[in-house]
Amino acid sequence: MSRPIVSRIPSTKLLYCPRQFRWSQRLVYFKHASGRYSSSKSPVPLPVLAPLPPTLKQKAAEVVYSDLPSGTTVTVNGWIRTIRKHKKYAFVNILDGSHDKVLQLVFNDPDRVNDLRVGVSLTVTGTIQRRQIPADPYEILVESYNVLGSVPEDEPYPLQNKYLSQDYLRRELPTIRFRSLSSGVAMRFRSRAVSELARYFDENEFIQTHPPLITSSDCEGAGEVFTVVSESSETPFFGKQGYLTVSTQLHLEALMMGLSRVWTLSPAFRAEKSITSRHLSEFWMLEAEVAFADRLEHIMSLVEGLLRTALTRLKESGALESVLSVKTYLEGQKSQDGHGEDKDQEITRAQVLQRWDGMLQNAPWKRITYKRAVEVLKQAEKEGKARFESSAEYGDNLKSEHEKWLASQYAQGPMFVTQYPSQLKPFYMLPTPGSCGGTVECFDLLVPDLGELVGGSLREFDYTRLKASIERTGVDAGDLEWYAELRKWGSVPHGGFGMGFERLICYLVGIYNIRDVIAFPRWVDHCVC
Ligand code: 4AD
Ligand code: MG
């Protein structure tokens, strides 16, 4: 089939725009080489199939899109969030996690809610009552309801409608927290982000691949691997030691040698004992590898283009607005209810906006070498502009405090630090031409408040030089022969990167701890559920 040429033509058809239930007059059409137009929303013809019970988000879209008049009968499902009884009426708010809005149910006899409790799941049939509130355009006047799942009468519902810190939700309510607004918005944003990142790769001819999670080598050579053993076998199950992957990079390189541009979003496992707000033992890493890329700039531009495009689209689609409206709501709730023993470091709505503005600034993101970064840090300390627990020294890894200062104070936005000394980086990186092996062609992308978000490099693509590097750095060559041999059969210059997916999400959603943007976080001494 011919590749579509994207063109926009005016259309009278309305498109649902999730921002505050407003409607857009634009519809994107694809023009095929044949001259035919097809709409991006044109339905695929299907036989008559049973529709799923609609979500509250779908129902809201239908009410507004089809302009359903007051009095139309509808059926909705959800969990009760609040119950308010008045003299003549009772109001019950339900939600279902499909978006951050609650739907108000109106009972014209308050006694009809006597059997209902917060947390109960139910199906409700009633009539639409249109309202003149743009953010909340309708409510349901209840005719009948059916409780699907009750809650114990003698126990308080754990997810009370008051401010609950992320820390509390994670510790005390690890499974039910997905019904909370804060967890819900993070999970929905995560899902939208995957779609937008995938879309960018797709549009740029990258092939999504699925490298293995069980490996025979430690990609980063940092000794942070988990070993895979079988309870039932006395000898190594795979005939040799197996590990959970710390990064799929090496296998991605093999795929790249045949497919040119590849990417994956895969779990990665690291037995790091660092108990910080930005480390997990199991996390998701977005990785890409690009053949024929012979300048570090290629890879940095790929990262910048990917993030700028995905963020712009997330913003346009209303995902940022949802994040901000939940934040505003929670900030209000917190100031009203108090925060108790809140261990979360607060990230305000204004800070979230600042982060997005920084990522989407007009100017290209700053790029400086590691050498220059160390000079800048030393100078700042000397001039009293910064105080660090330990001073930056050429030849040492940048500490988290240095990374945060560089991005927050020096660049005031995302910045690439390039060409680190080779002894600080893994064996596979390409030496900087003319540096006599002193530095390597690599970068870390640093962002304010968080520090390292992405690590990437050009890869050594010469067999003999890679073998020499493996020997020099002392990694186990036996397990890496297959990797070195990739360089034997038509090797090409190439490079790639890895981005911590949870770091990206907590940065953009303004959640302090990385553990709160992954469903079931694992870290040292913690593996709940
Ligand atoms: O910098 P790292 O260790 O790079 C690699 O693993 C390369 N092999 C990636 C590649 O080039 N394909 O990890 C990449 C990113 C980091 O920048 C960080 O954002 C994230 O992964 N990361 C973690 N995220 C959560 N918890 C951890 N323990 C993490 N360790 C690294
Ligand atoms: Mg790194």
Image (cartoon, rainbow, N blue to C red):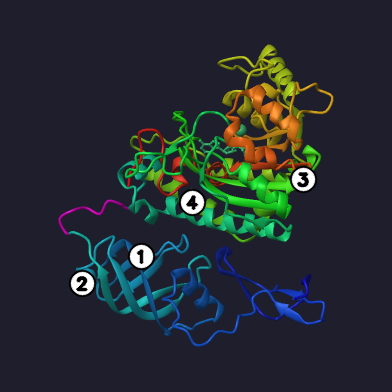
Pointer 2 residue: 111
Mark 2 or 1, closer to the camera: 1
Crowding near the residue tagged with mark 4, few <14, some 14–19, many ≥20 C-alpha atoms within 10 Å: many
Q: Residues within 10 Å of mark 2 (few under 14, many from 20)?
A: some
- Tell me the distance, in whole angstroms, between the alpha carbons under discs 2 and 4: 37 Å
Mark 1 residue element: strand
Between 390 and 142, the one nearer to me in the picture: 390
Residue type, mark 3 in image: Asn
The type of residue carrying mark 4 is: Ala
**Frontmost residue, 312 versus 209:** 209
Q: Earlier in the sequence, mark 2 or mark 3?
A: 2
Question: Where residue 35 appears, x then y in whole percent?
Answer: 82, 81
Up the image or down, 10 lies above or below 424; here it is: below
Disc 3 to disc 4, how far (Cα)?
27 Å
Which of the two marks, 2 or 4, is nearer to us in this view? 4
Q: Amino acid at mark 1?
A: Asn
In this rendering, position of residue 372 left or right of residue 207? right
Q: Any mark on residue 362, and which?
A: 3
Q: Which mark is residue 186?
A: 4
In primary-sequence order, the first of circles 2 and 4 is 2
